Amino acid sequence: LVKSAPYISKIMAPYSKFMDENEIRDPFIRNYMEMLCFLLSGAPSSGTMAAEIGYMFDDWYKPNSTLEFPKGGSGAIIDALIRGVEKFGGEIKLGSHVEEILVEGEGANKRAVGVRTRSGKTYVATKAVISNATLWDTVPMLPPDAMPQSWLDEVRGTQMCQSFMHLHIGIDAKDLPKDLEIHHIYVEDWARGVTAEQNMVLVSIPSVLDPSMAPDGKHVIHAYTPGNEPMAIWDGLDRTSDEYARLKEERSQVLWRAVEKAIPDVRARAEITMVGTPLTQARFLRRKRGTYGGTGWISEDND
């Protein structure tokens, strides 16, 4: 740790400063680095801590390293977490929308003691209440005087990251190449920058590695814009309206174009198609406006 002390200021600074100081100017390498920063942090290099990139690159570029995908998909991760919770006496409550975080005590002794669900059911905490909702979703669940005003001001000043567009497709895999890759990154125009809306798409085809994720002779595909879908154009829309349906169709086209780079005739092969929007994120993940989360803690001014 002592040996690392002289470098702490550099690794805590934005990664853009590292690239500038090391004269990384080649357009392709610079764009590639910007893309990796955005994929790892949801921010460009100017908003990504150098320590984060250094740690990830050290792991990423080790001999024989691979970009993996969980066998059984993301659902397998959830199942593993549930097993861990239940192994140590925990209990999972589904369909239990938390409406209020209960707080008791005064001053320094004030603490969260439980939660109340929308149905009126109360759960008492033995040690603490942990919220994995966003800042903007957690604060409304707290009593008005539960937290110091300075903390509330900091929360309200936190910058929101943008949201996602999602495209889930089930396709006929007949005669597709045997060496079809699982992961693809698509950038429409490098000159616009990787953070520009609708400019970068990630595509995963997990069934090429794990056939159990799709019926025989089929593939499942997930394409999404990684935190660069503006939330403002979706605010206030009725999910049942024709306007919403039209916007979904319009904003999902870039996702189709990305998948077509890997499977040119994917639209003809599609048997199941599902499109997700910021409103989908907000509804199913309880994230205000569908935001990816907070951002803006690192800037070019950080040293």
Image (cartoon, grey):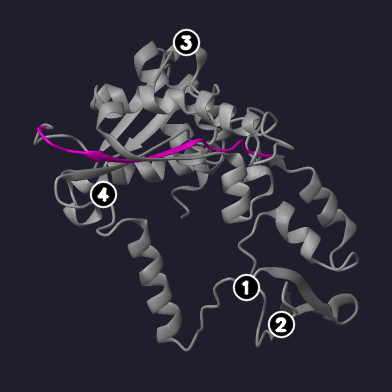
Whichever of callouts 2 and 1 sits on the residue coming sooner in the sequence is 1
Q: Is residue 65 visible?
A: no
Between label 2 and label 4, give the one nearer the viewer: 2
Residue contact between numbered discs 2 and 4, judged by CB atoms under 8 Å? no
The residue that appears at 46% across and 43% down in the rendered structure is 52
| In the image, residue 238 above or below residue 121 | above
Between 245 and 76, the one lying in front of the other is: 245
Give the residue type at disc 3: Ala
Residue 91 horizontal side relative to residue 221, left or right: right
Residue 166 at x, y percent in the picture: 46, 38
The residue type indicated by label 1 comes to: Ser
Q: Look at label 4 and name its amino acid.
A: Glu
**Label of residue 68 in the image:** 4
Residue under circle 2?
Answer: 121
Q: Nearer the viewer, mark 2 or mark 3?
A: 2
The magenta stretch spans residue 59: no
Could you tell me residue 192's position as x and y percent? 51, 13
Asked if marks 2 and 1 touch (Cβ < 8 Å), the reply is: yes
Measured Cα–Cα span from mark 2 to mark 3: 53 Å
Q: Residues within 10 Å of mark 4 (few under 14, many from 20)?
A: few
Label 3 near label 2: C-beta < 8 Å? no
Q: Residue at x 86, y 68 (%)?
A: 143
User: What range is drawn magenta here?
Assistant: 160-175
Q: Earlier in the sequence, mark 2 or mark 4?
A: 4
Q: Which residue is mark 1?
A: 96
CA–CA distance in space, label 3 to label 4: 30 Å
At label 2, which amino acid type do we have? Lys
The residue positioned 38% from the left and 33% from the top of the image is 202
Q: Element at badge 4?
A: loop
The residue where tag 3 is placed is 191
